[in-house]
Image (cartoon, helix red, strand yellow):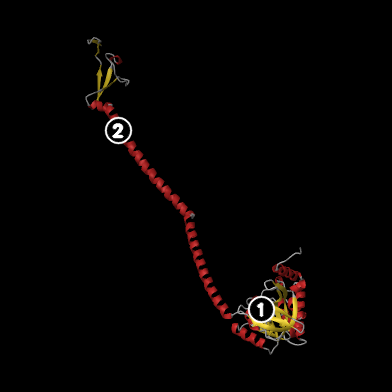
Amino acid sequence: MRSVYSVGQVNSYIKNMFTQDFMLGRIYVKGEVSNCKYHTSGHIYFSLKDETGTIACVMFAGQRGGLAFRMREGQQVIVLGSVNVYERDGRYQLYAKEVILDGAGLLYEKFEKLKQELEEMGMFEQEYKRPIPPFASTVGIVTAPTGAAIRDIIHIASRRNPYVQLYLCPALVQGEDAAESIADGIRRMDAFGVDVIIVGRGGGSIEDLWAFNEEIVARAIFACQTPVISAVGHETDTTIADYVADLRAPTPSAAAELAVYEYDVVRVYLDETERKLKRALSHAVEEKRNQVMQRAQRLSYLHPQVKLNEKRQQAVDLEERFRQKMQERLKEAKHGLSVRAERLNGLSPVRKLGQGFSYVQNEIGVNIRKIEDVCPGEILSIKVTDGTIRAQVTEVEKEAEDGGKHSQRE
């Protein structure tokens, strides 16, 4: 039995064949616009036809940036897009990314070819882009001296900052010699030494703007040592110069705003910054002054004279304590001496004499304490309270152990 496939399988298979075809992934199709409808969702549905046939087309809302005009019935256009199958309806259609009028078709192809070549050379790389100086004082302008572009730039620059110097290098911006004139103007301004260069002109068709798509202009911008702002045409116009330049401005007026800083805004910012710096400086000075005072106070505590005074005071305190201790010790010693003197006074023979006792010595001063210390006839000295009595021993009488007495005479 032969294989049987569903409708979905067949449509999916055909879609896969379209997807794998490299040529259908990026194709230019030329024809006349018919059945053009702008949907409320933003999508555009139309057909391209010629004398041999018709192809359905759709441009989704996200791709509308590739359309610089409003499409109408009967227009001859060139559509860049991809051909693929819409599986639900089982039909193929052209998914448009860009749409241009047929008159500009050859130039557009030339534009795409040069763009691809320069991109492969790396001339569009971000690493080669120089920053635009935020406070440029001199601005070079390469454009026509009588066009609307120079008037817009002068008006915007004068309004934003009248102190910025504008230097114009007149150049042809349209025609056969325009590309060489623009490239020469860029080189002249670069050699003159301005801070930033504006290269541009007012809007127009792709033919009018073609000088800015020439390789000589692209290489002059890439070789320029001064930052370059491209300002070609209106916001929807894009040229090779825009890709090579350090910064793209949608219009010449926007380029002037990007190149010339606003004086009043900067002045207000500087005034506010000055006030902040003064407050910060005043605060810092006050803080440092307090630190100096604190350290001076600490140094005054550590001054040798202070230490010397402290030591002197300590010496005075020790001397006073020593004096008090000495007085206390002397007082205690005096008291002890008084007690001992009183005790000695109580033991003094003289005091005993005053109590009716006497002190007896022999002739050689030996105290007579026993009867064995004297002999009859010996002269004795008897000390009494008011003097000395000399007496001769006539008899010595000794008490016997039994209580009796024995006497010894001279």
Residue 338, image x, y percentages: 30, 34
Q: Nearer the viewer, residue 373 or 59?
A: 59
Image point (22%, 26%), residue name: 355
Image point (73%, 74%), residue name: 83
- What distance separates the C-alpha of mark 1 from that of mark 2? 128 Å
Q: Which mark is residue 339?
A: 2
Q: Quadrant of residue 1?
A: bottom right
Q: Quadrant of residue 240?
A: bottom right
Q: Which mark is residue 124?
A: none
The residue most toward the front is: 1
Could you tell me which quadrant the C terminus lies in? top left
Q: Please, what secondary structure does the residue beneath circle 1 have?
A: helix
Image vertical order of residue 304 relative to residue 252, above or below: above
Q: Nearer the viewer, residue 309 or 280?
A: 280
Image vertical order of residue 194 relative to residue 145, above or below: above
Q: How many marks?
A: 2
The residue most toward the bottom is: 146
Image vertical order of residue 141 relative to residue 329, above or below: below
* Residue type at the position of mark 1: Gly
Q: Please, what secondary structure does the residue beneath circle 2 have?
A: helix
First in residue order: circle 1 vs circle 2: 1
Position of residue 353 in the picture relative to residue 75 (left or right):
left
Residue 354, image x, y percentages: 23, 27
* Residue type at the position of mark 2: Val
Q: Quadrant of residue 98?
A: bottom right
Image point (30%, 16%), residue name: 373
Which residue position is annotated with label 1? 65
Instruction: Say whether residue 152 is visible.
Output: yes
Image point (77%, 86%), residue name: 177
